Image: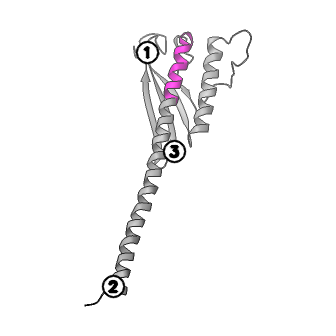
Amino acid sequence: MDRGFSLVELLVAMVIFAIGMLGLASLQGHSLQYNTDAYERSQAVFFAYDMSDRMRANIAGVNANFYQNLTSAAPPPAASCVAVTPVCDNATMADADATEWFAEIATALPGGGGSVICQDSDAGADADACTDGSMHRITVTWTGKWGAQSLQVDVLP
């Protein structure tokens, strides 16, 4: 009766252990990728609701159509309402909101961009391009691990 391990048994055990460790390393790599994706999605949600809050804070600007058709591809003129005396008017506040929002998205998300598009409630039946009380679609886009990503939120400011 032989006692102990043979070299073949030891090599088989090492191969099984190595395969298990490779599987564990792969699992760790995938969890990091999914964690990054979840973080980017949570940032996109934050930015979408940030813009909806900005719009609610300047409802007169929303009703005057200053938040209609904002896109990071064609942003409004850069504006700032920090330390302004007297306080910014509604149009300047909307431009400042868009300027800050687009800059924050571009900084926080890879390839980040955004848009705010009015979903006119009366489909253009009147002269107002965005009738008061219309829904607005806020879209945040970025380039994630698996290509172009986007998040859309419809809000009623």
Q: Secondary structure at mark 3?
A: strand
Q: Is residue 106 left or right of residue 81?
A: left
Calculate the distance from the C-alpha at mark 2 to the C-alpha at mark 1. Answer: 80 Å
Tell which circle, 2 or 1, labels the residue nearer the N-terminal end: 2
Residue bearing mark 2? 4
* Residue sitting nearer the eye, 109 or 133: 109
Q: Which residue is mark 3?
A: 143
What is the basis of the colouring in this image? Answer: one colour
Question: What is the residue that sits farthest to the left in this orientation?
Answer: 1
Q: Position of residue 85 (x, y in %)?
A: 74, 11
7 or 51: nearer the eye? 7
Marks 2 and 3, how far apart at CA: 56 Å
Work out whether 6 lies above or below 111.
below
Question: Looking at the image, which is closer to me, 12 or 99?
Answer: 12
Image: 42 above or below 63: below
Residue 124 sits in which quadrant? top left
Residue wearing tag 1: 134
Query: Where are the magenta residues, as a range?
Result: 47-61
* Three-letter residue code for mark 3: Thr
- Residue 105 is situated, as x and y percent measured from the top left of the image, at 57, 34
